[in-house]
Amino acid sequence: MRFLLAFLLLLSGWAGAAQASDSGARPLRVFVSVLPQKTFVERLGGERVQVEVMVRPGDSPHTYEPTPRQVAALADADLYVAVGGTFEDAWMGRIRSANPHMAIVNTGEGLDLRAMQAHDHDRDEEVAPEGGRHQSKDPHLWTSPPLVGQMAARIRDALIALDPAQGLFYAANYASFTSELEDLDRDIRAQLAGLSDRRFMVFHPSWGYFADTYGLIQVPIEHEGKEPGPKALVALIEQARREQVKVIFVQPQFSRKAAAQVAAAIDGRVEVMDPLAPDYSANLRRVAAVLAGAGSR
Ligand code: ZN
């Protein structure tokens, strides 16, 4: 494996040299849905890609509506990298018709998707929603580094299909990115290994794949995308007391009102964990450190 990596890096040097002599070619124009995908596409495509993000900083990917300017800009795009889910469910038809020649890759396709988690306040436990109505799939795949490795392979293949002359360059970047992801995965496992309390309470359930990968349990506050009602809030506060929760996690794109109410009632605190941060690896290391600090007592 190490030998293969060295070989690919060597090839990447050649590809880089080839690229320098070919500087007249315009970069591939790539659209992605959420910010972490921009990081992934840039790690794989380097200077060969120019990446635009649909969901603006601070906006929720679930309710986002692309601006007319963004839809118009799709006319020049070579590739759309979809996460599968979120606002894409309502918009993919319009995205497709804005540019019928654009390649579209859904990086979540064929992966083992979990159901979007909801809090069942009657049974007072978190459950996967059942029945057709709420059977939506959880789109937050990128919170799990091993899944990002699988998503990256699809992005790599899409870039090579559009720009086969630079195939070795994309393959070498993929090799170095997956090696970074393996380091990240190992570090997070080490950080969370000794954690005594493996539950964490979070407003919006973005961290299900992260939790699955690292043996944690995510307890969501949000109910079907909305703030919990007064009765649900009381149930959550009781649960937080019973489970001795001290930290409630929020992300910047969602209200922190309910989280702050629960935190005040249990004399705990609110911390930010942002699943949409652009500095992917550093951000997940931060998240693991915060969870490790919150869960040890
Ligand atoms: Zn979300």
Image (cartoon, grey):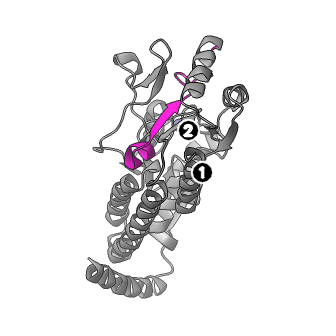
Check the picture and name the quadrant holding the C terminus: top right
The residue under label 2 is which amino acid type? Pro
Examine the rendered structure and indicate whether residue 264 appears above or below residue 171.
above
Horizontally, residue 203 falls left or right of residue 84, namely right
Dot 1 crowding, Cα within 10 Å, few <14, some 14–19, many 20+: some
The magenta stretch spans residue 212: yes
Q: Which mark is residue 61?
A: 2
Examine the rendered structure and indicate whether residue 149 appears above or below residue 267.
below
Number of numbered callouts drawn? 2
Q: Confirm whether residue 286 shows in the render.
A: yes
- Nearer to us in this view, 55 or 7: 7
Q: Looking at mark 2, is its residue's CB closer than 8 Å to ligand 1?
A: yes
Instruction: Give the residue displayed 42% in from the left and 60% down from the top.
Output: 185
The magenta stretch spans residue 219: yes
Residue extent of the magenta highlight: 209-229
Horizontally, residue 58 falls left or right of residue 100, namely right
CA separation, marks 1 and 2?
A: 28 Å
Dot 2 crowding, Cα within 10 Å, few <14, some 14–19, many 20+: many
The residue to which callout 1 is attached is 293
